[in-house]
Amino acid sequence: MSGRFISLLPPLRRLVQGGFLLFSLFVGVRFYQFFQWAVAGGDYTPRPPAVEAFLPIGALVSFKQFILTRQYDPVHPAGLTIFMAALLLAFFLRKGFCGWICPVGCVSELLHSLSCRGRAALGRSARSLPLRLPPWLDKPLSLLKYLLLGLFLYLILWQMDLAALENFSRSPYSITTDARMLLFFQHPSRLALVIMIALAVLSLLFRNFWCRHLCPYGALLGLLALAGPLQVLRAKEKCIDCKKCEKSCPAAIDITGKNRLTAPECIGCLECVACCPQEDCLTLTVYGRKKITPLLLPGGLLALFFAIWIAAVFTGHWQTSVADDIFKHFYLRISG
Ligand code: SF4
Ligand code: SF4
Ligand code: SF4
């Protein structure tokens, strides 16, 4: 594959990430309008099912219920669909959900580029500040996301039996999780505000802080990607140790220290492949054997994601079966 096509990967990724970020903002605004209609009256806006993408814990509950009973969550079907799509993408396409679709990852990268510009403007001393935590702190902190994941898996997969899962799914709490999330961001407690500001500052100081150290969703996807077929290989003999790959890697992976990039933090963004000046030094492969064109990753990712979405819409696994008036009833109870 010629370098001309490989160099298209970063702008293509910005375009895809930007598209999903804008779509997420649109969904947020539409959900806010729906909520306002429910609690304050006025013009009706339909509830956007995609808002359920922001409820991964509820999706994990629905996922277990689906595995045990083969019943699809009727309250948050879109949440379950997106969750299962993310699992599939993580396994087959190198955690590509994080690298190409997740709006939080996109915001995290935007904060990083903002920070780089700020450092450049502030001069040499600011430019020399480290973008990563020192290894003695980075490594143990990276384990935090697995601890959080372990906690959720323990509470949901281990502790909740079928009756508990069904009680939760039908509860007013479950029906109002989307509205609770909105209220959380609209009126954060002082502690929540401090935590959010701290995370934003840490993301400005250290590249990809939330995703690399704390996100349990990303931890789950990373573990699945470990067993997946796609891997970036580094041909050691062709590498000139220029470190351009490491500077461009949003996941802050120590690329030149490895020949096979299988770290669970790798988000399949292919920025390293695109910026490597040595032809065929970094290549995308299937299980480290068959070399494939890097464009197959975003192509497959988008094709699979949209195919799942279209299938869900046409088979009734997208739109909630809860009537708007029921949402209204419960939203009024929690907004009082
Ligand atoms: S690690 Fe979490 S927040 Fe970051 S991109 Fe992945 S799912 Fe999104
Ligand atoms: S960009 Fe390519 S040549 Fe440079 S250090 Fe990375 S792998 Fe080696
Ligand atoms: S190793 Fe390469 S593909 Fe993986 S996250 Fe870093 S830049 Fe992206």
Image: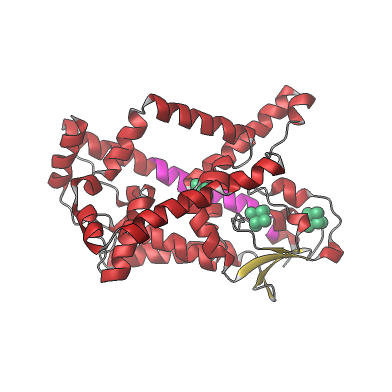
Q: Position of residue 108 (x, y in %)?
A: 55, 40
Q: For the N terminus, give its image quadrant.
A: bottom right
Using residue 113 as the reference point, say whether residue 194 is left or right of it.
Answer: left
Give the residue at x 38% y 42%.
26
Assign the C terminus to one quadrant of the image. Answer: top left
Q: Quadrant of residue 261?
A: bottom right
Nearest the viewer among 146 and 260 is: 146
Q: Residue furthest front?
A: 159
Which of 172 and 51 lies nearest the eye of the viewer? 172
Q: Nearer the viewer, residue 258 or 106?
A: 258
Q: Position of residue 275 (x, y in %)?
A: 74, 53
Number of marks in the rendered image = 0
| 112 lies left or right of 306 | right
Which residues fall within the magenta stretch? 6-25
Residue 270 visible in image: no
Point out the residue furthest to the bottom here: 290
Query: 44 left or right of 184?
Result: left
Whole-percent x and y of residue 100?
54, 53
**Vertical relation: 30 (above or below) 227:** above
Residue at the (79%, 63%) spot, across then down:
281
Based on the picture, tell me whether residue 313 belongs to the magenta stretch: no
Instruction: Tell me if residue 130 comes above or below residue 104 in the rendering.
Output: above
Residue 8 forms part of the magenta stretch? yes
Q: In this orientation, which residue lies closer to the viewer: 10 or 126? A: 126
Residue shown at the point (36%, 54%) measured from the top left: 155
Q: Which of the 4 image quarters holds residue 157?
A: bottom left
Indicate left or right for 111 with 284 as reference. left
Residue 16: x, y in percent? 52, 52
Q: Image point 69% across, 72% down: which residue? A: 288
What colour-coding does the image apply? secondary structure
